[in-house]
Image (tube, rainbow, N blue to C red):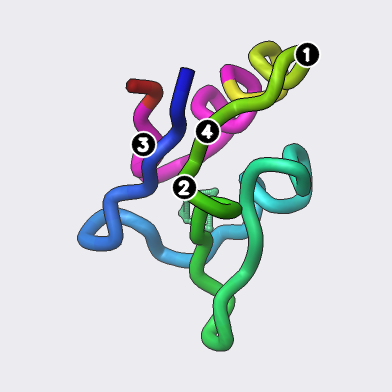
Amino acid sequence: MKVKIDPERCQGHGRCYDLAPALFAEDDEGYGQVVGDGAVPDGEERTARLAVANCPERAIEIL
Ligand code: F3S
């Protein structure tokens, strides 16, 4: 499983990196970015889905 953020949609709400800091981080302007290549480690799948469900812009995709 991998996560991806669509930079066209992300408005910097920050829910992703608050809820799933192992998977997402904040860039210099507060926009979300995936950690590493976006690969979701074992045990973080539920957190990945939580982040997807909580992004108000629907900017996060699970691949
Ligand atoms: Fe952006 Fe959504 Fe995260 S708007 S900062 S991807 S919660």
Q: Quadrant of the C terminus?
A: top left
Mark 1 or mark 3: which comes first in sequence?
1
**Label 2 residue SS:** loop
Residue 7 percent across, percent down from the top left: 29, 61
**Label 4 residue SS:** loop
Please report contact status of discs 1 and 3: CB closer than 8 Å, yes or no.
no
**Label 3 residue SS:** loop
Q: Mark 4 points at which residue?
A: 39
Q: Name the residue under label 1.
A: 43
- Residue 58: assigned label: 3
Please report contact status of discs 2 and 4: CB closer than 8 Å, yes or no.
yes
Under mark 4, the amino acid is Ala
Mark 3 or mark 2: which comes first in sequence?
2
Residue 48 percent across, percent down from the top left: 61, 25
In the image, is 47 to the left or to the right of 4? right
Q: Name the residue under label 2.
A: 37
Write down the region rendered in magenta.
Answer: 49-61
What is the distance, in whole Å, between disc 2 and disc 4 at their CAs?
A: 6 Å
Under mark 1, the amino acid is Gly
**Is label 3 or label 4 in front?**
4
Mark 1 or mark 2: which comes first in sequence?
2
Under mark 2, the amino acid is Asp
- What number of labels is visible? 4
